[in-house]
Amino acid sequence: IFLIPLIGSLGALREQLILLKIFCGLVIFIIMIEVLLIILAFVFWERIVESIKNFTLDKIIVQYHDDLNYKFIIDTIQELLKCCGAVGYLDWARNDYYNCSSTNPSLFRCAVPNTCCLESVRTRVSHLNL
C-alpha cells in the first residue's frame, strides 16, 4: 500500500519517466484486478451468499453464547437488518442453548435471542396505550 504511492511521488518529484511508467502500470494492474473481482462476484453471487450463510450457521450461530465477538456480530446484524438467523428463526435450533429438544436444560430452550425481530416487538409495545 505504501510502495505504489511512493513510486508515483518519487517519479513525479524527480521527473523520472521510468518510475511514472511503473506507477501507471501498477495502478492499471490493480484496477484490472478490481474489475475482475467484481465480475467474478456477479458470476458467483449465489455461491458467495450460500457460503456466507453456511459460515454463519456453522460458526456464529452455533457459538453464539460461547464467543462474545460472535454474539456482538450476530446481534448487530439482526438489529440492523431486522432479521432472525441466517435464513430464519429455525437456524437457532442448531445452537445448544436454543434448541428445542426435551433434554436441553437451558433457560433459552425453544427461544431466540432478544435481537431477533426486535423492531416488531418495539412497534407492538409502542402501540400500547397504557
Image: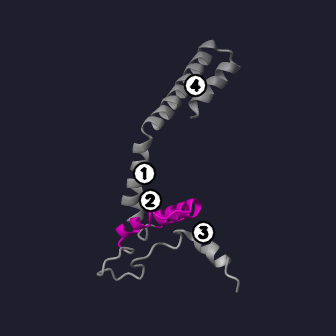
Identify whether 12 is placed above or below 56. above
Magenta-highlighted residues: 68-96
Residue bearing mark 3: 119
Which quarter of the rendering shows the C terminus?
A: bottom right
Q: Alpha carbon of mark 4 to alpha carbon of mark 2: how far?
A: 38 Å
The local secondary structure at tag 4 comes to: helix
State which tag comes first along the sequence, 4 or 2: 4
Question: The residue under label 3 is which amino acid type?
Answer: Glu
Residue bearing mark 2: 86
The local secondary structure at tag 2 comes to: loop
Q: Of circles 4 and 3, which is in front? A: 3
Residue depicted at x 48% and y 33%: 37
Residue depicted at x 62% and y 29%: 5
Marks 1,2: beta carbons within 8 A: yes
- Give the colouring mode of the picture: one colour
Question: The residue under label 2 is which amino acid type?
Answer: Ala
Residue depicted at x 51% and y 61%: 73
State which tag comes first along the sequence, 1 or 3: 1
Relative depth, front residue between 20 and 64: 64
